[in-house]
Image (cartoon, rainbow, N blue to C red):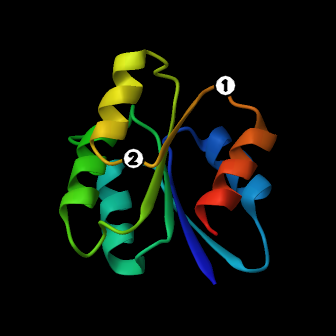
C-alpha cells in the first residue's frame, strides 16, 4: 500500500485531490498546515507528499520541505510541490531544496494524476 500525504490548506483543493487520487492500493493522508503535515510524515512515513507552499501558521511549505529533506526519517519521501506560486525562482528554490517536482495551480487534473503515478512507481 502506497501512502500519499496531501498538505494543502484549501479544503476544496484537498477534497478534489482526495477524490482524484483515490485508488484501492493507496492510503491518502491529509493535513491543513505544515506542523500537522510534519507530524503525519514522521508517524506515517508516506511514499509521496503533495505540498502547497503557502500554508498558515509558523511554518510554510518551504520550511516543511527543508525539514522533511533534512530529517533521515522522512528524507526518502518524494515531494511534489503544488502551488499557485508560479515564478521561476520559486520553482528553482523548491527543486534545489529537494522537491522532486513542481506543479502550478491551477493544474490539469490529468497532469497531476500522471505525476503522482510516476512518483509512486
Q: Which residue in the rendered view is the most extreme toward the top?
A: 87
Residues under numbered marks 2 and 1 in contact, where contact means CB atoms less than 8 Å apart: no
Between 35 and 21, the one nearer to me in the picture: 21
Identified at 42% across, 17% down, the residue is: 88
Q: Is residue 83 left or right of residue 59?
A: right
Q: Taking 92 as reference, is 119 above or below it? A: below
Classed neighbour count for the residue bearing mark 1: other residues with Cα under 10 Å, few (<14), some (14–19), many (≥20): few
- Mark 2 or mark 1: name the one nearer the start of the chain: 2
Image height of 46 relative to 18, above or below:
below
Give me the residue at 56% from left, 74% from top. Answer: 3
**Which is more foreground, mark 2 or mark 1?**
2
Crowd band around label 2 with a 10 angstrom C-alpha radius: few (<14), some (14–19), many (20+): many
The image position of residue 40, as x and y in percent, is 38, 69
Residue holding disc 2: 99
**In the image: residue 65, left or right of residue 40:** left
Position of residue 14 measured from the top left corner of the image (x, y, whole percent): 62, 48
Q: Label 1's element?
A: loop
Q: CA distance from mark 2 to mark 1?
A: 19 Å
| Residue 24 rendering spot, x and y as whole percentages | 79, 79
Q: Element under label 2?
A: loop
Quadrant that contains the C terminus: bottom right
**Residue 39 rendering spot, x and y as whole percentages:** 31, 68
Instruction: Tell me: 91 left or right of 109.
Output: left
x 61%, y 77%: residue? 2
Is residue 60 in view from this perspective? Answer: no
Residue 7 is left or right of residue 59, and the answer is right
In front of the other: 100 or 54: 100
Whether residue 100 can be seen here: yes
Residue underneath mark 1: 106
Q: Residue furthest bottom?
A: 1
Q: Quadrant of residue 36?
A: bottom left
- Residue at position x 45%, y 53% in the image: 79
Amino acid at each position: 500500500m502506497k501512502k500519499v500525504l496531501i498538505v494543502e490548506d484549501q479544503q476544496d483543493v484537498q477534497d478534489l485531490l482526495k477524490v482524484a487520487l483515490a485508488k484501492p492500493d493507496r492510503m491518502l493522508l491529509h493535513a491543513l498546515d505544515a506542523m500537522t503535515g510534519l507530524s503525519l510524515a514522521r508517524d506515517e512515513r508516506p511514499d509521496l507528499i503533495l505540498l502547497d507552499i503557502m500554508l498558515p501558521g509558523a511554518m510554510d511549505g518551504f520550511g516543511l520541505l527543508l525539514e522533511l529533506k533534512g530529517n533521515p526519517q522522512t528524507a526518502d519521501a518524494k515531494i511534489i510541490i503544488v502551488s499557485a506560486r508560479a515564478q521561476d525562482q520559486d520553482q528553482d528554490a523548491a527543486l534545489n531544496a529537494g522537491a522532486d517536482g513542481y506543479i502550478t495551480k491551477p493544474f490539469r487534473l490529468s497532469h497531476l494524476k500522471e505525476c503522482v503515478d510516476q512518483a509512486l512507481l
